[in-house]
């Protein structure tokens, strides 16, 4: 009956930070029907640390140094209770509920339970040490120390993980977005962007993160579509009786603050889009509620506001906790640099100077409710809403093939392309989670989630002008679709569930709880609809325009009436009798049924093993009606993948002693082509166009890891990992050999990845005394070396003909060397202190896209790879605690302000009369992001 009652409660999670261990609990009066016992004394024997219970019988001994204590409970007229051998562990909470009366309680009536605070670096490291498999996590404590503001920044502080400029998500061991997966509380999340498989990690601010786990090895509870890592975000929940905190943090970007900043007309400071539909239904009507002319402003100030809090309610020996977080964050960024392209004839396709103005707004609200039973079981419900809005105005000025052929030294002709874009993504996450004890050995873990994504790109505006510099005359270009407005909508619904039954085994290690049998089932159903309409301004000949006033001088109803331009969509102008406003679209569905089983067993105090197998039935189908192809044509098949996967895994652990551990892990996984990668939809940008390949195949991945760990102390570690991966039918993004600079996706044959990772956390100095003061100097190092090689072949399974420049190459996005390091000084005295950190990261150069365009008659011919140059970053983070309530943050980020640089070397093999010298490095994209200065205050009530 108790189990049935538990299922009636719901919860939502979020956790607070603890620096040391603590003992909490409730005292009850056995002589008065177990009513709460207030004003009793609780103290640690042999110390001066003590408290009294409150009116509800609750008590909390905080900030206890790790160790073993005797806890004494006394009340006038009642028998004193002493509980010996109570272990206090750093960053964990020991719960002791004690019944008291005129006669002493038997010790077996006392319930002692320890729970982990997973925000703490020490607690996470202890969990890593005890686990059979290979795990790595970063908690809120480290996020704060390193000045990390979101989940994306968190994972880049972990060994072997990097963020690549121009790519929204991270690379793990050289493997990009398609090879990774993202979960929230171990339930899958959808992507907000049709270009990506994984949701953008910068959506998740540090306000909602308890910890971020990076699982680089596969185990059967994970979905099999992963080869790099599963990134699991654990959301915060309340610990303690209650809290309320407010913080504000203004900041400035050195490159944006003093600029005359361009802002899209009708875009909102708070980042809300109200109308996402095409505003006209008649191509003879020019009625838009915004202008091509951008607005201007000065004094760009970034800011961040956060409010969080919660309350705990004790219901008998059970607990109900409520927690909420609200956050508003906005940032300005100014970029200037080059944007050049090489054509297949050995000359420039474009030579642009680019100026870009970016403004980003994110708003987040999260709430959770959690009911925890005295035995440790719980039921929880989480809800989170994230609204992300990005606005940009980008000007490209210079030479462009097809526009500036009449350019001469005495009569310069230049092109100006202005692209204005606003994107809004709304994510709504709902989760229900439970963990229940059915019997002494049998337990159940279950969860379900329903998530929705709504993504909008309303009225992306592109203007293309040709400028006679001497005459100071600008004309709107007359090519097809060079001046346009673009509208798109993405809707995705994602339903997922998990059910696990665990049966505890009697392993040979009495201190371990690892021995068990797990049987489980996972289900996921994803539906995505993406549609878009593009309105094109068609000029029969170039038309004079005032660039500073394009709407009044040209783009208006009068010019449409006078026939200076006409409006069409990508479906035409309706003269063929078809509705030109029917949007292009693709619809994707994916259903996954998974059964799993695994056995974990401690064969001795030294040796443990986990062996499992996962079966997945996957069906993915994408129907499309786009500017390139349509499944409405009976001769065109949809993209269909209908496969069964059997995915084994093993994890072995051997302890040479308590602090010296070696682990071995192996598995098979797969990589599924994503909706966008298989949908033949041409996405047009100024620099690159991209389209999908409906004939992509799944890739099979074989993974092996060997790791050695040595723990100097509970918070100190040195670890070395060697890993190997073999990928069959690897999927890569390539540059198609075309004048338009188009990108697509192909299977390129087999790939091999191997590498070594080093992790070090060590206290250089640690001093403390009896006056509650502490001084520590801590050094952290993450370093990885990566070797990757793939055979580049034009596989016969698709309709794309690809001739690679090189016969083999490194993997796209893989930096051979990645380094992360931090040095942290912590000075603490009672409730005040300062934490200062210097954080350095370095990513060596990597391939952005693979070069193509060679021909068999000229080996080695074709475009070379586009390469991202090495990037170093340096941050200085300061966190000052004035007292237990008031705190200050002073940070300087991106101090080195490195240049983000994409380059491509000229390759003239097989090119007659090349305009550029062979081997010349061409800057494809360059820009700097600016140094960010921030100051913030927080207050806890």
Image (cartoon, rainbow, N blue to C red):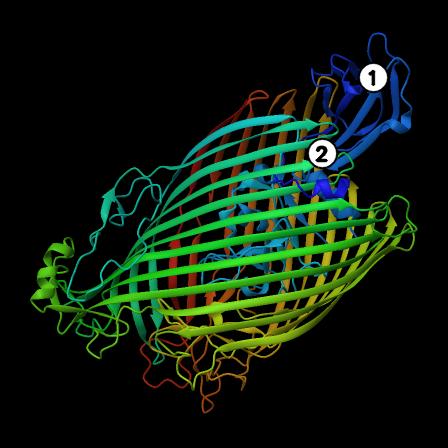
Relative to 226, does residue 749 appear above or below in the rendering? Answer: below
- Residue 828: name its quadrant: top right
Q: Position of residue 66 (x, y in %)?
A: 78, 30
Q: Which residue is mark 1?
A: 73
Asked whether 33 or 292 is in front, the reply is 33
Q: Nearer the viewer, mark 2 or mark 1?
A: 1
* Residue occupied by mark 2: 91
Image coords of residue 288 (percent x, y)? 20, 55
Q: Quadrant of residue 885?
A: top right
**Would you place residue 524 above or below residue 268 in this image?**
below
Q: Give 770 or 802, whichever is nearer the viewer.
A: 802
On the rendered image, what quadrant is the C terminus found in?
Answer: top right
Q: Position of residue 367 (x, y in %)?
A: 54, 38
Distance of mark 2 from mark 1, alpha carbons?
23 Å
* 350 in relation to 781, above or below: below
Who comes first in sequence, dot 2 or dot 1?
A: 1
Instruction: Categorize mark 1 by other alpha carbons within 10 Å: few (<14), some (14-19), many (20+).
Output: many
- Asked which secondary structure carries label 2, the reply is loop
> At x 24% / y 58%, what residue is drawn?
279
Residue at the outermost top position: 76
For this view, does 1 lie left or right of residue 354?
right
């Amino acid at each position: 009956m108790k189990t049935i009652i538990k299922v009636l409660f719901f919860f939502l999670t979020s956790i607070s930070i603890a620096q040391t261990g603590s003992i909490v609990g409730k005292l009850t009066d056995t002589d008065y029907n177990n009513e709460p016992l207030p004003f009793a004394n609780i103290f640690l024997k042999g110390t001066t640390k003590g408290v009294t219970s409150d009116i509800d019988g609750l008590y909390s001994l905080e900030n206890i140094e790790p160790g073993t204590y005797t806890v004494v409970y006394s009340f006038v007229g009642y028998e004193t209770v002493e509980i010996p051998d109570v272990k206090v562990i750093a960053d964990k909470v020991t719960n002791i509920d004690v019944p008291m009366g005129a006669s002493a309680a038997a010790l077996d009536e006392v319930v002692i339970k320890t729970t982990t605070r997973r925000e703490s670096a020490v607690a996470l490291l202890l969990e890593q040490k005890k686990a059979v498999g290979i795990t790595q996590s970063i908690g809120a404590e480290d996020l704060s120390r390193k000045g990390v503001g979101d989940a994306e920044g968190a994972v880049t502080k972990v060994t072997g993980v990097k963020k690549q400029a121009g790519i929204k998500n991270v690379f793990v061991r050289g493997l990009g977005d398609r090879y990774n997966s993202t979960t929230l509380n171990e339930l899958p999340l959808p992507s907000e962007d049709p270009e990506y498989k994984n949701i953008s990690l910068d959506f998740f601010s540090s306000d909602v993160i308890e910890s971020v786990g990076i699982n680089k090895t596969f185990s059967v509870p994970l979905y099999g579509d992963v080869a790099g890592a599963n990134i699991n975000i654990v959301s915060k929940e309340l610990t303690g009786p209650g809290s309320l905190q407010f913080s504000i943090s203004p900041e400035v970007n050195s490159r944006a603050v003093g600029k005359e900043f361009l802002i899209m007309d009708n875009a909102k400071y708070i980042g809300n889009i109200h109308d996402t539909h095409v505003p006209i239904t008649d191509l003879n009507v020019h009625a838009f509620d915004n202008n091509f002319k951008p607005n201007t402003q000065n004094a760009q100030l970034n800011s961040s506001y956060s409010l969080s809090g919660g309350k705990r309610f004790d219901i008998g020996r059970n607990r109900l906790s409520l927690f909420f977080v609200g956050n508003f964050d906005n940032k300005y960024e100014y970029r200037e640099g080059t944007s050049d392209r090489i054509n297949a004839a050995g000359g420039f396709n474009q030579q642009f100077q680019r100026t870009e103005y970016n403004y980003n707004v994110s708003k987040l609200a999260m709430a959770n409710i959690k009911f925890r039973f005295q035995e440790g079981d719980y039921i929880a419900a989480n809800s989170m809403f994230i609204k992300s809005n990005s606005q940009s105005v980008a000007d490209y000025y210079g030479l462009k093939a097809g526009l500036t052929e009449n350019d001469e030294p005495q009569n310069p002709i230049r092109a100006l392309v202005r692209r204005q874009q606003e994107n809004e993504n709304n994510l709504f996450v709902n989760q229900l989670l439970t963990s229940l004890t059915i019997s002494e050995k049998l337990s159940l873990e279950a969860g379900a989630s329903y998530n929705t994504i709504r993504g909008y790109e309303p009225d992306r505006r592109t203007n293309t002008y040709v400028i006679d510099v001497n005459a100071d005359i600008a004309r709107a270009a007359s090519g097809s679709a060079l001046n346009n407005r673009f509208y798109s909508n993405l809707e995705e619904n994602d339903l997922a569930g998990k059910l696990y039954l665990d049966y505890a085994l009697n392993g040979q290690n009495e201190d371990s709880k690892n021995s068990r049998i797990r049987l489980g089932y996972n289900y996921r159903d994803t539906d995505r609809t993406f549609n878009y309409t593009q309105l094109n301004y068609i000029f029969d000949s170039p038309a004079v325009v005032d660039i500073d006033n394009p709407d009044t001088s040209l783009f208006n109803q009068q010019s449409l009436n006078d026939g200076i331009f006409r409006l069409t969509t990508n479906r035409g102008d309706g003269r063929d009798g078809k509705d030109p406003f029917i949007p292009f679209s693709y619809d994707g569905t994916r259903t996954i049924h998974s059964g799993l089983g695994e056995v974990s067993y401690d064969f001795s105090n030294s040796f443990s093993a986990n062996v499992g197998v996962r079966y997945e039935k996957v069906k993915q189908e994408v129907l499309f009606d786009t500017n390139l192809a349509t499944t409405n044509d009976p001769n065109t098949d949809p993209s269909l993948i209908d496969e069964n996967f059997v995915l084994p895994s093993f994890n072995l652990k051997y302890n040479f002693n308590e602090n010296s551990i070696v682990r071995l892990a192996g598995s098979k996984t797969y990589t599924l082509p994503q909706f966008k990668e298989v949908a033949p939809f041409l996405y047009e940008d100024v620099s690159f166009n991209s389209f999908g390949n409906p004939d992509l195949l799944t890739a099979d991945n074989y993974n092996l890891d060997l790791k050695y760990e040595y723990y100097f102390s509970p918070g100190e570690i040195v670890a070395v990992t060697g890993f190997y991966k073999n990928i069959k039918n690897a999927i890569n993004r390539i540059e198609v050999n075309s004048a338009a600079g188009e990108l697509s996706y192909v299977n390129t044959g087999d790939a091999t990845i191997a590498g070594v990772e080093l992790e070090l956390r060590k206290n250089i100095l640690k001093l403390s005394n009896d006056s509650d003061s502490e001084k520590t100097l801590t050094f952290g190092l993450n370093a990885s070396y990566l070797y990757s090689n793939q055979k580049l072949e034009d596989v016969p399974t698709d309709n794309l003909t690809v001739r690679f420049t090189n016969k083999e190459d490194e993997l796209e996005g893989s930096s051979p060397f990645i380094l992360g390091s931090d040095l942290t000084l912590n000075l603490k005295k009672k409730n005040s202190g300062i934490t200062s950190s210097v954080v350095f990261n370095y990513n060596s150069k990597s391939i952005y896209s693979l070069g193509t365009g060679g021909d068999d008659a000229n080996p080695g011919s074709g475009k070379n790879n586009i390469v991202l140059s090495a990037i170093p970053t340096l941050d200085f983070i300061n966190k000052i605690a004035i007292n237990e309530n008031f705190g200050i943050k002073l940070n300087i980020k991106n101090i080195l302000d490195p240049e983000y640089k994409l380059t491509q070397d000229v390759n003239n093999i097989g090119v007659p009369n090349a305009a550029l010298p062979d081997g010349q490095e061409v800057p494809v994209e360059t820009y700097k992001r600016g140094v960010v200065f921030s100051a913030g205050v927080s207050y806890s009530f």
